[in-house]
Image (spheres, rainbow, N blue to C red):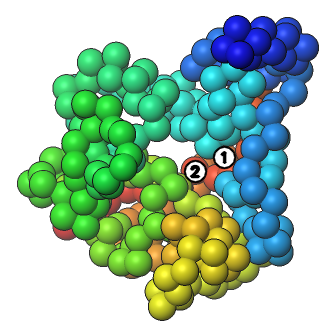
Amino acid sequence: MEILQKIKKKLKLIYFSGSNYHCPFCGYSSKSLEVVGHDLPVLREKQVIGGGRRPAGCYKCHSRDRERLLYAFIVEELKLPLETRILHIAPEIKLSKILLNKNFNEYICGDLHTPGYHYPDYVKNINILNIPYEDNHFDIVICNHVLEHIPQDIEAMRELGRVLKPGGKAILQVPISKNNQSTHEDFTILDPEKREELFGQFDHVRIYGQDYFTRLESAGFLVNKVNISKKYKKLGVNPAEDIFFCEKKNA
């Protein structure tokens, strides 16, 4: 059975091989992208960027559009100096391995460890609401599709800002509605199926609206939206996804 699965995968990679897209993590080039995500009415209705059923996956390593977007921005665009201190919340495995190999002055990966889940040895048990580092410590914070899981999201944003140096930068991505101004949230809903129906995933507590910008500002950030999709079209990034590249306001 295992041999058969390997043969099927090899044939699949041969079939989809092409030159339209290139994965920076595994090096596979393809003529199309693997369809991933869930086709839920709420995600279609609210036109959620970063969610829903869409062609976004690598056929070989299964990296997704939002991880490749971070790769393009952090590795190719920012070209961070080695003396940079980085905090990466809920780190994506493929991206974090690349950043670990850069040998930055400090690269801290953290996630709130949940029973039943496996975490690489380098991922520390860190609660985003209580980060165990002093004020003004990091140059860069990466937090990709995490805040939609946290009821106290403004508090989490402020805690991320606390550990950033004045003028430090934060990449704070979330699934966001393209056509709704206001964020839709309800913390009284605990049933996983109801959360999936209303928020697009069983462990989400909200769908952000265009007021996400205002929320970030209220937490002490200067917000700059960047879109690099045209430059990195070959990486199969989502053309509608802006990067929320935030700066900690000087005290």
Please state, as top left, top right, bottom left or bottom right, where the C terminus lies in the image: bottom left
For label 1, the residue is 227
User: Cβ–Cβ below 8 Å for labels 2 and 1?
Assistant: yes
Q: Which residue appears at 41% of the width and 78% of the height?
A: 151
Residue drawn at the location 54% of the way across and 80% of the way down: 191
Q: Is residue 46 left or right of residue 185?
A: right
Q: Amino acid at mark 1?
A: Asn
Q: Nearer the viewer, residue 229 or 156?
A: 156
Query: At x 81% / y 60%, what residue is drawn?
Result: 39
Q: Is residue 38 left or right of residue 148?
A: right
* Image position, residue 220 (x, y; %): 33, 71
- Figure quadrant of residue 206: bottom right
x and y percentages locating residue 192 in the rendered image: 56, 74
Task: Confirm whether residue 163 shows in the render.
Answer: yes
- Tell me the kind of residue under disc 2: Ile
Q: Looking at the picture, how far across and down is residue 71, in whole percent?
A: 54, 31
Residue drawn at (45%, 58%) of the image: 146
User: Of marks 2 and 1, which one's residue comes earlier in the chain?
Assistant: 1
Closer to us: 117 or 82? 117
Which SS class for mark 1? Answer: loop
Q: Is residue 197 left or right of residue 100?
A: right
As measured in the structure, the alpha-carbon distance from the residue carrying label 2 to the one carrying label 1 is 6 Å
Position of 141 relative to 250 (above/below): above
Q: Is residue 131 above or below residue 16?
A: below
Q: Circle 2 sits in a helix, a strand or a loop, which is it? A: strand
Mark 1 nearby-residue class (10 Å; few <14, some 14–19, many ≥20): some
- On the image, numbered disc 2 is attached to which residue? 243
User: Residue 189 location in percent, x, y?
Assistant: 53, 86
